[in-house]
Amino acid sequence: MELRHLRYFCAVADEMHVTRAAERLHLAQPALTQQIKALEGELQVELLRRVGRRIELTEAGIAFRREAEAILDRVRVASLIAQETARGQTGRLSIGLTESSGFVPAVTAILKQARERWPRVETSLIQARSGSLVTALIERRIDVAFVRPPAPPDAALQSWPFVSEAVVAVVPITHRLASQRSVTFSTLAREALIWPQARDGDGPLHTQIDAAFTQLGRAPRIAQETPEFVMAVNLVATGLGVSLVPQSIVGLRADAVVYLPLRSTPTFSIKIILLARTADASPTVANFLALAREYTAEHGDRPSPVSL
């Protein structure tokens, strides 16, 4: 028995007329009659009977029609799901985020766009440090990741600059600089600093700040090193020191800290990069990466002007 036999039988059951069913199926009437007879022979039951010039279903035919229609419906659904999956319109996508990248408007914007464009894709968000996300990506526990540079030197991964952010100063709300409209780095450099760790993702900003201190001919007075920008803001809120953070963090702990644009030179910026596996053939991943490239092409990855 083949699916076509089910379709032939259901067409006859719908039309209750072999000739009309044959026309609907684009078959010759004798050929359709032969196929129905062959089906009945295989089942060894009578599905249809003639009553005068009419056709009606037997009890076995009624039961068979119900199950045949259910099977054909499932086949149609399976075909649709297979086609949508091949186009990346359904399936699963696991996205890794660092704690601070979740604050970046460009990141949340593309997550929203992906949801709107592919509502049948089940998306999960995983938050972790950059190094942990890289490991999860290599081990196929996540599909893509938004991380802070540097990109890992691993041939199994590919990376793209996604967005670049301006860097702002953050000081305790009780600090003498809190009343200022902006601050220079040379002024900030005299304060105790909450310092970004160089390892696991925050290296570029660490390098920029270190170079700025070298240019000033001064060593930084480090109150505390921290692995994440959100933690840096929380430490600033305690009064432990001041820090430099991406503009997207602005607004966090507004009850206890003040954010200040940096004026004059040097200025700092920090990127968000998008990582994926080099050999990933998943259509959902391919669609998401294409969307990210579209976003970057339209908006660029340059820092937006600081407006606090």
Image (tube, helix red, strand yellow):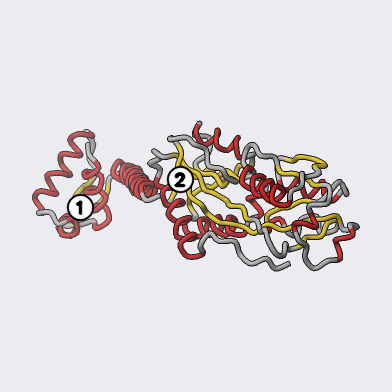
Q: Nearer the viewer, residue 13 or 222?
A: 222
Residue at disc 1, secondary structure: strand
Instruction: Relative to 159, say whether 118 is above or below.
Output: below
How far apart marks 1 and 2 lie (CA) works out to: 50 Å
User: 154 left or right of 172?
Assistant: left
Question: In what quadrant of the picture does the N terminus appear?
Answer: top left
Q: Residue furthest front?
A: 217
For the residue marked with disc 1, what is the amino acid? Val
Residue 134: % across, % down: 55, 37
Dot 2 corresponds to which residue?
A: 91
Q: Position of residue 116 (x, y in %)?
A: 51, 60
Horizontal relation, residue 127 to residue 232: left or right: left
Q: Is residue 29 visible?
A: yes
| Residue carrying label 1 | 51
Q: Residue at x 45, y 51 (%)?
A: 289
Helix, strand or loop at mark 2: strand
Q: At 72% from the left edge and 49% from the top edge, which residue is drawn?
A: 213
- For this view, does 174 lie left or right of residue 287? right
Measuring 69% from the left and 46% from the top, which residue is drawn there? 210
